[in-house]
């Protein structure tokens, strides 16, 4: 079996189980006879940026989905002649996830951020290591309840603002904890 076939099997495992396989699972998946063979393959795949290890030593994906071509730009205003040229390639991981260890995905419920283009059932990619700046969309715990809103700071006053006029601003009565900053929105059509 070639290295590309190994990558394909590991990628399919990741897509099916929503996690990377353990060394034992890779050994079984690829019909290896020893964990040493798995260790050697993992090191080769790390050098290729296909996968990596987190701070606890668990395998994490890097370029599981491979590169996708960027074929130029498309006009969102008035129509113009299309020109297709290979501008570059990029992985979705590189584009959407700057800090893999501090990043997670949440499914959106509710319509309080619809005017910011975030709809119910969208997925948001959030970074828990990012420090919120005025106007960022954040994931916050306010007086024991969780929400996603704009982070607004005026002087010493901090509050959360919805992107839907039917919702009032949220001023913490006791406690406000910012858990993460929203970095991207994912929507499937």
Image: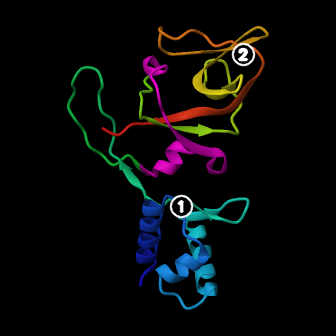
Quadrant of the rendered image containing residue 41:
bottom right
Most foreground residue, 40 or 15: 15
Most foreground residue, 99 or 125: 125
- Looking at the picture, the colour scheme in use is rainbow
The outermost residue toward the front is 144
Reading the image, the residue beneath label 1 is 19
Quadrant of the image for the N terminus? bottom left
Q: Is 161 situated left or right of 131 in this image?
A: left
Quadrant of the image for the C terminus? top left
Residue 141, position as x, y percentages in the image = 68, 28
Most foreground residue, 171 or 157: 171
How many other residues sit within 10 Å of disc 1, few (<14), some (14-19) or many (≥20)?
A: few
Sequence order check: which comes first, mark 1 or mark 2? 1
Q: Is 184 situated left or right of 145 in this image?
A: left
Instruction: Say what secondary structure mark 1 lies in.
Output: loop
x 41%, y 70%: residue: 8
Residue 182 forms part of the magenta stretch? no
Q: Which residues are magenta?
A: 89-116
Q: Is 186 situated left or right of 22 in this image?
A: left
- The relative height of residue 3 versus residue 130 in the rendered view (above or below) is below
């Amino acid at each position: 079996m070639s290295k590309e076939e190994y990558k394909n099997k590991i990628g399919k495992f990741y897509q099916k189980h929503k996690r990377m396989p353990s060394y034992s699972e890779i050994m079984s998946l690829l019909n290896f006879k020893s964990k040493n063979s798995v260790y050697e393959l993992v090191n080769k795949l790390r050098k290729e940026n296909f996968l990596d290890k987190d701070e606890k030593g668990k395998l994490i994906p890097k370029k599981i989905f491979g590169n996708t071509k960027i074929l130029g730009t498309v006009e969102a205003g008035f129509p113009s002649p299309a020109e297709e040229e290979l501008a570059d390639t990029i992985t979705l991981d590189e584009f959407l996830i700057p800090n893999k260890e501090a990043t997670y995905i949440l499914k959106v419920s509710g319509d309080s951020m619809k005017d910011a283009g975030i709809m119910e059932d969208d997925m948001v990619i959030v970074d828990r290591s990012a420090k919120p700046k005025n106007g960022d969309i954040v994931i916050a715990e306010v007086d024991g309840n969780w929400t996603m809103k704009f982070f607004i700071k005026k002087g010493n006053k901090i509050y959360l603002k919805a992107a839907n006029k039917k919702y009032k601003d949220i001023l913490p009565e006791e406690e406000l904890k910012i858990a993460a900053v929203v970095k991207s929105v994912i929507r499937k059509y």
